[in-house]
Image (cartoon, grey):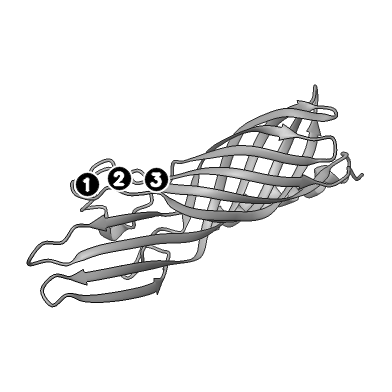
């Protein structure tokens, strides 16, 4: 991880720790079902498909004026996509699932009523890749052979890496919170960070970004001081 990435998370942690000592805050647990994909804007013959993934993590809510709040999360989120390359008499058919795993920190400005109800938020996220896998099923028309492969995702900029480690983007959320602190919401993450490694930037002309839509279920615990 580069130094400025460490600085970002370090400053964020210190700010929240110092603010939390003075303000009334809430903590919550979160789980989500994701539909992830990427936007290959310029790549004839390769159409990415949606990949069902998941998010688990927690959230901290700090009060701001006029029923607004600062929500900061810490999540493990899987992203990615699926794709298929149709084979011919002389080439193989490939079906692949790409599922990178990120540690993600979303920060959003939200509004809601004092006793719950409808709420919404808008903000940004920063994420760093830590794991994941690439699974491929290869069918050869020549000998009718079927081969399955699986490899771990490697992050970085060297020749043998899959993707750069750092990702960032915007996030919006809209949902409902009950008086008991149960939240049901929909979230959409619009990636801005380029998903390509340096090795493949010459092949894919336009940037490639993550897109993740989520259905989330959260439970917010009682306020603490």
- Tell me if 119 is positioned left or right of 4 in this view: right
The residue that label 3 is drawn on is 209
Q: Residues within 10 Å of mark 3 (few under 14, many from 20)?
A: many
Instruction: Report the disc number at residue 40.
Output: 2
Instruction: Report the disc number at residue 17.
Output: none
Residue at the image position 39 percent from the left and 60 percent from the top: 98
Name the residue nearer the viewer: 171 or 192: 171
Query: Is mark 1 in CB contact (under 8 Å) with mark 2?
Result: yes
Q: Residues within 10 Å of mark 1 (few under 14, many from 20)?
A: few
Between marks 2 and 3, how big is the CA–CA gap? 8 Å
The residue that label 1 is drawn on is 43
Residue at the image position 41 percent from the left and 64 percent from the top: 156
The single residue placed furthest to the left in the displayed view is 90
The secondary element bearing badge 2 is classed as loop
Total numbered labels placed on residues in the image: 3
Between marks 3 and 1, how big is the CA–CA gap? 14 Å
Query: Is mark 2 in CB contact (under 8 Å) with mark 3?
Result: no
């Amino acid at each position: 991880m580069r130094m400025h990435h460490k600085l970002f998370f370090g400053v964020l942690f210190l700010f929240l720790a110092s603010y939390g000592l003075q303000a009334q805050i809430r903590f919550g647990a979160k789980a989500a079902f994701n539909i992830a994909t990427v936007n290959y804007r310029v790549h004839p013959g390769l159409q990415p498909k949606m990949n069902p993934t998941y998010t688990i993590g927690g959230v901290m809510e700090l009060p701001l004026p006029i029923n607004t709040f600062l929500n900061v999360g810490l999540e493990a989120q899987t992203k990615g996509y699926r794709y298929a390359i149709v084979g011919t008499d002389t080439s193989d058919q490939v079906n692949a699932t790409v599922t990178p795993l990120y540690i993600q920190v979303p920060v959003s400005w939200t509004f809601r009523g004092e006793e719950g109800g409808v709420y919404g938020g808008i903000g940004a996220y920063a994420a760093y890749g830590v794991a994941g896998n690439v699974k491929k099923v290869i069918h050869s028309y020549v000998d009718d052979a079927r081969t399955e492969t699986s490899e771990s995702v490697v992050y970085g900029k060297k020749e043998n890496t899959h993707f750069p480690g750092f990702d960032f983007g915007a996030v919006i959320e809209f949902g409902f919170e009950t008086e008991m602190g149960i939240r049901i919401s929909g979230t959409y993450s619009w990636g801005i960070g380029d998903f390509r490694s340096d090795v493949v930037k010459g092949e894919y002309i336009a940037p490639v970004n993550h897109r993740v839509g989520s259905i989330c279920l959260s439970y917010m615990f009682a306020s603490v001081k």
